[in-house]
Amino acid sequence: MSTPPLLPRADLERLHDDVMAWFETAARDLPWRRDVSPWAVMVSEFMLQQTPVARVLPVYEAWMQRWPTPADLAAEPAGEAVRAWGRLGYPRRALRLHAAATAVVERHGGEVPSGRDDLLALPGVGDYTAGAIASFAFGDRAVVMDTNIRRVFARVVSGVEYPAAAVTAAERELATALMPGEDAHVWAAATMELGALVCTARSPQCSACPVADLCRWRASGYPAHDGPVRRGQSWEGTDRQCRGRLLAVLREAEGPVAKARLDAVWPDAVQRERALDGLVADGLVEPLDSGLFALPGDR
DNA sequence: TAAACGTGGCG
DNA sequence: TCGCCAAGTTT
């Protein structure tokens, strides 16, 4: 147990007050903030994993229109969720959201649970999402650490440009120590919003930051990140790209498709078969007895 | 722990 | 143009 490098009490209070006051005026009017039903929060959190808000908005609206409750989604085949997911990316999230909705119906009477352990037991819900649902949907005092919040704390408090690749114990202690006594759920939303709108990864707008005068990274002259360089994701020619192509065919088709339709979108047969097998193993694609391929449950 | 997992927009 | 990055989770 190390002592977290906390701010002086007066600075900590000002950090709370200024960020919360800023949030009151700058918070975006997002649909999952208007309808704060736990299901709305849960759906938005799944969609927002590694995906920008702007791309989520239209898919989210259509999704909630079609499936207003977990039971509504659970009543349909998983393939419908995959299809409705569209081009949001990481389609296993659609499968997991469908599975989570099913679990909510089976284990929690159709109501999204509020307890951390119950949330973590749902498919696709990890440390961040459990905290986000507890905080945003139920107003609980939960530690929430997403990429935005972590970056804000790294800069303002720790004085470095970026947080470590993975959450460290010290970082969790810091986030816990920084939580205000009251309205921790507002603090979570406010710090996340600050990271998303002002304290951005690439070009932070420090002139618009409510706590620029407290920021240790700024005070020390914006030292560049010195840690290991984050490995970029390769894309061209990868299995990932191939999977995307194959699944797009199925998503855009009316029903099951012939193998030839899949073969047409990727030239390398070895890689194509490997990717298709992977999609089947993941449950994103079903090989039918007829020899056709379909989204799960799509007959 | 590190690698896999989609997609598209921005600097 | 092209690498970086986006409200992470799983294995």
Image (spheres, coloured by chain):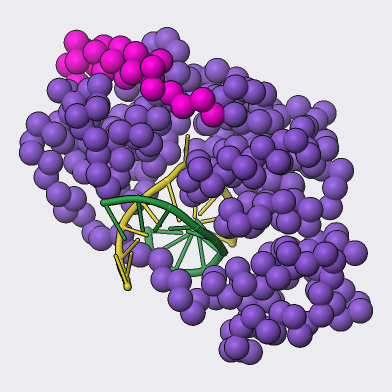
Chain colours: A purple, B green, C yellow
Q: Report if residue A241 is visible in the image.
A: yes
- Side of A217 relative to B5 (left or right): left
| Quarter where residue A274 is shown | bottom right
- Side of B1 relative to A290 (left or right): left
Q: How many marks?
A: 0
Membership of A132 in magenta stretch? no
Q: Position of residue A20 (x, y in %)?
A: 36, 16
**What residue do we see at 24% from left, 59% from top?**
A228
Q: Report if residue A158 is visible in the image.
A: no
- Side of A290 relative to A110 (left or right): right
Residue A169, compared with residue A237, is above or below; it is: above
- Magenta residues, dominant SS class: helix
| Quarter where residue A113 is shown | top right
Q: Position of residue A259 (x, y in %)?
A: 78, 82
**What residue do we see at 84% from left, 70% from top?**
A256
Q: Position of residue A172 (x, y in %)?
A: 36, 34
Q: Which quadrant is the C terminus of chain A positioned in?
A: bottom right
| Magenta span | A6-30
